[in-house]
Image (cartoon, grey):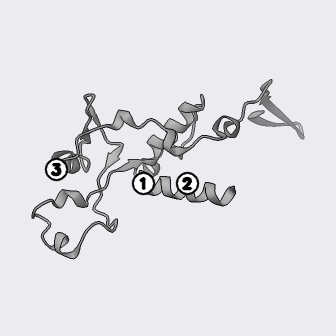
Amino acid sequence: MYLNEVIDKDEERYYNVTLFAEPIQLIDRLEGKLLKEIDFSVLNHAYNYTNIENSWTTGVTLTAGGTSTDVFYPLVDTGTVSPNAFANYLGIEAHTAYTPFVSIKFILDKIFAGAGFSYVSSFFNSPFLAACIWTLTQAYNFLTSIQTLLV
């Protein structure tokens, strides 16, 4: 059921609703699905200085053509940077310190589309959520831990 509007008239309240016959819930469609099953191949791109730097502005150049701002390479200590590597930022292999992060909105869009759903949401379409990113390695490890606790 979807509440379209509430009308107060002559000390009475009327509800305008839309009823759906056989509701299909998002949770039913997602049962048993894992984040690692999402197809991220549309974001395939070369791992190089140019794409790392472009992720901060115009977006990475995709292998299939075009660009995407759904991949971002922030300067984050993921435990792979030694103090010497950071001190020699412009030195050899400095780009190996960057881990790709993916837009959370991109992930949510893939989840909804994969389940055959769409959404209308000021939050999901907000600049705030568009700026939120997550490394897929951390996402996978987090969800695997949660699944282990639930078994």
Amino acid type at mark 3: Tyr
Q: Which residue is mark 1?
A: 137
Q: From the top left corner, tell me how far across and down residue 5 is, in percent.
A: 74, 35
> Which quarter shows the C terminus?
bottom right
Q: Which residue is mark 2?
A: 143
The first of marks 2 and 3 along the sequence is 3
Amino acid type at mark 1: Thr
Q: From the top left corner, tell me how far across and down residue 116 is, in percent.
A: 59, 28
Residue under the point 42% across and 51% down: 136
User: How many angstroms separate mark 3 from mark 1 (CA)?
Assistant: 21 Å
Q: Nearer the viewer, residue 8 or 139?
A: 139
> Which quarter shows the N terminus?
top right
Q: Are marks 2 and 3 in contact (CB under 8 Å)?
A: no
Q: From the top left corner, tell me how far across and down residue 132 is, in percent.
A: 43, 53
| Residue 132 visible from this viewpoint | no
Q: Which residue is mark 3?
A: 49
As drawn, the residue found furthest toward the left would be: 91
The first of marks 3 and 1 along the sequence is 3
Helix, strand or loop at disc 1?
A: helix
Amino acid type at mark 2: Leu
> Left or right: where does residue 42 sit relative to residue 124?
left
